[in-house]
Image: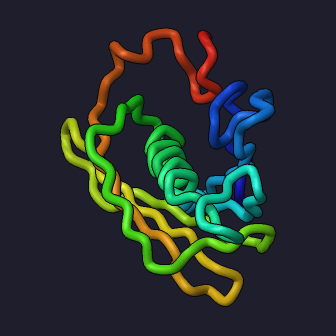
Amino acid sequence: MKRQIPYHGWCFVCGNENPHGIGITMFVGDDGVLTSEFTLNEAHQGPPGHAHGGASAAILDEAMGLVVWAAGHKVAAVNLEINYHKPLPLNQPLTLETYIIEIHKRKIFSTGEIKLTDGTIAVSGRGIYVVAPDLFKNVGLKGKES
């Protein structure tokens, strides 16, 4: 079973209130895997007809962090590694998948991929997140004070 990750207000990647944002809807399954299907458009363009690398990096940054938050850890990113394998075409469906790969006392590692319609990995990433509960006092998964 999958549950939708709440939108984060003005968040550039997963907010529904930011008119300039990407506005991706994400889901997390009982297996802890976060997924999304989305399409980028001309507002996200870098090279003609393709997404800007910063857009794909932002998507992976948000998704790799959210999968850790969805598992109940209040964390902040301390390191991101993004690998570009193929350009992301605009106006074509893309899929996203992220999951946790390691949990230590203070550090949590996650990984993610953005795939083309044929399943080819276009962009992959790895993130290191540090538990930082004091940074997020009174903040829930929605990013608003609770």
Q: Quadrant of the C terminus?
A: top right
- In the rendering, at what x and y percent does residue 15 appear? 71, 34
Is residue 44 positioned above or below 78 on the image? Answer: below
What is the quadrant of residue 75 in the picture? top left
Q: Quadrant of residue 47?
A: bottom right
**Closer to the camera, 45 or 86?**
45
Query: Residue 87: percent from the left, percent from the top?
Result: 56, 75
Q: Position of residue 114 (x, y in %)?
A: 56, 69
Residue at 68%, 53% in the rendered image: 44
Vertical position of residue 142 compared to residue 51: above or below? above
Can the viewer see residue 6 in this picture? no
**Residue 26 in sight in this render:** yes
* Residue projecting furthest to the bottom: 118
Quadrant in the rendering for residue 73:
top left
Q: Is residue 17 above or below residue 116?
A: above
Q: Residue at x 67, y 58 (%)?
A: 45
Q: Residue at x 31, y 57 (%)?
A: 81
**Viewed as shown, does residue 19 lie left or right of 125?**
right
- The answer to whether residue 126 is above or below residue 48 is above
Residue 123 or 139: which is nearer the viewer? 123
